[in-house]
Amino acid sequence: MKYSLQINNRKWCVSFYLPQNNGKFKQKQLSTGITALDNKGNKINKRKAEEKAKEIIARFDGLVDSEFANWTLDKCAEFCLEQRKTKLSPTTYFDYQNALKVHIKPYFQNRKPIRDLKARDIEAFCNMLVREGKSAKTVHKMLGLIGPAFRYAEKNDFILKNPMNVVDKPSKTRSETHYYTAEQLNILAKAAKGSYIETPVILAMVLGLRRSEIVGITWDNVDFENRLIHIRQSVVTGDSSILPKGTYKVIGEVGGRRKREIILKTMLKTDSSVRSFTMNDALYNYLKMLKAEQEVMIRETNAYKDFLCVNAVGTLILPDSITHYFTKLLDKNDLPHIKFHALRHSCISLLANNTAFTMKQIQDYAGHGDFLTTFNVYSHTDDSDKKTEMDYITSCFTDLFGISDEE
């Protein structure tokens, strides 16, 4: 990069032209901090200034001056979120938009531009979140929104180096996954009987389905003749425009301050999520009875007559409603608090702790894309298992514990 040395306010300055992303050039002049004139007005320290100028030019060589570099971090993060929104699910995209609005924008919108941010600025934001009582998981989520903005700026030469590479992030503490035992599931099943979310609870307990998969089941997915129930679609809420064409259908709208579409997705989380279950007598009889009840119910709308999970007047029970009413159901019946998704975990855990089933069978039942997910997340042992294992181990050390063969 070409440059020239000039004198400004008795200091040597380096002057050069920085390319912009529109193909034009913008002149910059930076002080070297080196005195250029003595008391008599004679030029001094030019060689020293040349060395300093080369250092400055080396920092800016290849850098592109852009309007993006003048944006504040919240604006950059919002821009990058829009750039990659088609890679996200509508629910995740909606959550990220909310995180930007609630946490990132209020903090960064009136601060210095992204090109001037240092690692300490990001760490100050993280520390503020921690002081407010936010979990390490939430902090990492915010960094997950900020990170793409810095990567984009670095990739396009808007910044010299990415401060995220040296940010000290709070350590994630792996929280213990809570799930129900078979006894607790029985209590829950009785409590859910006749409740607003009876059907979602039963399908989560028996089939280990995700919320969106449960809501997405339509009666044409239930093959009574062959006793099969197919998981082929899901229902989420959010912005359908981020989804690939031909993979969804908008079936309604959620009101409120931030309106969202109700979206029937025909493309599930992974290819393995598309699966079928053979219904046993218990599930077959339950769904037969549910079908008969819905055929004679008085509906306020016929828009959701093809769906299993509707309320008493035929309105679709949405995933967020399931979460809301599940918490109320647990409170009302003094049951330990778990997330609704933990019913899926409970279901698969019961299978994982039964030696009659292989991990491959459980993987297929859960609809996991890989074996390790099933093995690492859903295999548990209870205290009785540990005692049996200990009995075997101590039996191997007869001399240590004074156990004789005669015993």
Image: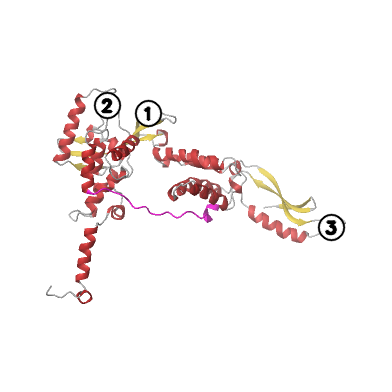
Q: Main secondary structure of the magenta part?
A: loop
Does residue 298 lie above or below 379 as drawn? above
Query: x, y (%) of residue 285?
Result: 15, 36
Percent from the top left, x then y, of residue 240?
40, 33
Please state which amino acid type lies under the numbered disc 1. Glu
- The location of residue 169, given as percent across then percent down, is 49, 54
Who is closer to the viewer here, 315 or 1?
315
Left or right of 42, for residue 363: left
Which of pointers 3 and 2 indicates the residue nearer the eye? 2
Label 3 amino acid?
Asp
Q: Which residue: 84% across, 58% down?
A: 38
Would you say the residues marked 2 and 1 are in contact, meaning their CB atoms lie under 8 Å apart?
Answer: no
Q: Of label 2 and label 1, which has the lower sequence position? A: 1
Q: Disc 3 designates what residue?
A: 38
Q: Which residue is mark 2?
A: 314
State the separation of the CA atoms marked 2 and 1. 15 Å
Instruction: Please identify the quarter of the rendering in which residue 221 is found.
Output: top left
Q: Where does the image place residue 378, in percent across and percent down from the top left?
A: 28, 52
Res. 138 visible in picture:
yes
Q: Callout 2: 10 Å neighbours few (<14), some, many (20+)?
A: many
Kind of element beneath mark 1:
strand
Residue extending farthest left: 406
- Say which label, 3 or 1, has the lower sequence index: 3
Q: Which residue is mark 1?
A: 253
Q: Amino acid at mark 2?
A: Gly
Q: Residue at x 20, y 63 (%)?
A: 388
Q: Which residues are magenta?
A: 163-181
- The disc at residue 12 is none
Task: Say which quarter of the image contains residue 237.
Answer: top left
